[in-house]
């Protein structure tokens, strides 16, 4: 059953939220956004992702990537007009673009390459050790909790619950 909500913008512009999206329907049936380069987002490991954008006609100097907080912005500057060329069909869009990707917490860009018209952006989720889950050991029932010992810490006598005498 399909929902009445269009979730495709979430799929197209987020990285690292795959656990949430596993709960949602993956097949939205919506194509690429007009005037934007086509791209794939793939999970290549437990904490590693890759964005591959089709940027035919753009060189490394024409593309700028900026990560600010949890947002990655990829901007492509169009080349100037091509003098003396007469096209019968122009299917390769060489238009300026700006694509935003919302990244999950602790996801950072590790590398970017441009080869054969494909911009490949490597991403890694690096959760700090203090935020990672940790196992808590549970003690046996015979041990008492700290500060609730059977003896008074000052005099070494049993704690009677009375103050002074």
Image (cartoon, helix red, strand yellow):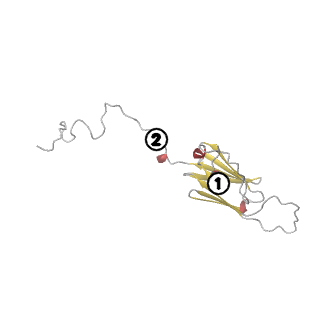
Residue extending furthest left?
165
Q: Quadrant of the N terminus?
A: top right
- Secondary structure beneath disc 1? helix
Q: Quadrant of the C terminus?
A: top left
Tag shown at residue 134: 2
Query: Badge 1: few (under 14), some or many (20 or more) residues near its Cα, within 10 Å?
Result: few
Residue 8 or residue 74, whichever sits in front: 8
First in sequence: mark 1 vs mark 2: 1
Label 1 to label 2: alpha-carbon separation: 34 Å
- Secondary structure beneath disc 2? loop
Q: Is residue 83 left or right of residue 19?
A: right
Q: Is residue 161 left or right of residue 45?
A: left
Q: Is residue 61 left or right of residue 108?
A: right
Q: Closer to the observer: label 1 or label 2? A: 1
Query: Badge 2: few (under 14), some or many (20 or more) residues near its Cα, within 10 Å?
Result: few
Q: Are marks 1 and 2 in contact (CB under 8 Å)?
A: no
- Give the image quarter of residue 140: top left
Tag shown at residue 9: 1
Tag shown at residue 79: none
Residue 78, position as x, y percentages in the image: 75, 65
Residue 34 or residue 65, whichever sits in front: 34
Residue 65, position as x, y percentages in the image: 65, 59
Residue 62 vs 41, above or below: the answer is below
Count how many numbered circles sit on residues in the image. 2
Q: What residue is shown at x 46% (from left), y 47% (from top)?
A: 130
Residue 145, position as x, y percentages in the image: 31, 38
Residue 16, position as x, y percentages in the image: 59, 49
Residue 13 or residue 113, whichever sits in front: 13
């Amino acid at each position: 059953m399909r929902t009445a909500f269009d979730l495709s913008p979430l799929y197209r512009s987020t990285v690292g939220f795959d656990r949430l999206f596993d709960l949602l329907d993956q097949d939205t049936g919506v194509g690429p956004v007009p005037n934007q380069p086509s791209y794939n987002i793939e999970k290549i490991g437990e904490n590693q992702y890759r964005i591959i954008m089709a940027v035919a006609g753009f060189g490394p100097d024409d593309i700028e990537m900026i990560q600010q907080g949890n947002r990655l912005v990829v901007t492509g500057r169009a080349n100037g007009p091509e003098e003396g060329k007469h096209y019968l069909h122009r299917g390769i869009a060489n238009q300026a673009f700006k694509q935003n990707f919302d990244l999950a917490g602790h996801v950072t860009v590790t590398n970017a390459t441009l080869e054969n018209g494909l911009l490949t952006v490597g991403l890694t989720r690096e959760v700090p050790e203090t935020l990672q889950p940790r196992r808590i050991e549970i003690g046996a029932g015979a041990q008492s909790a700290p500060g609730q010992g059977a003896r008074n810490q000052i005099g070494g006598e049993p704690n009677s619950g009375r103050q002074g005498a």
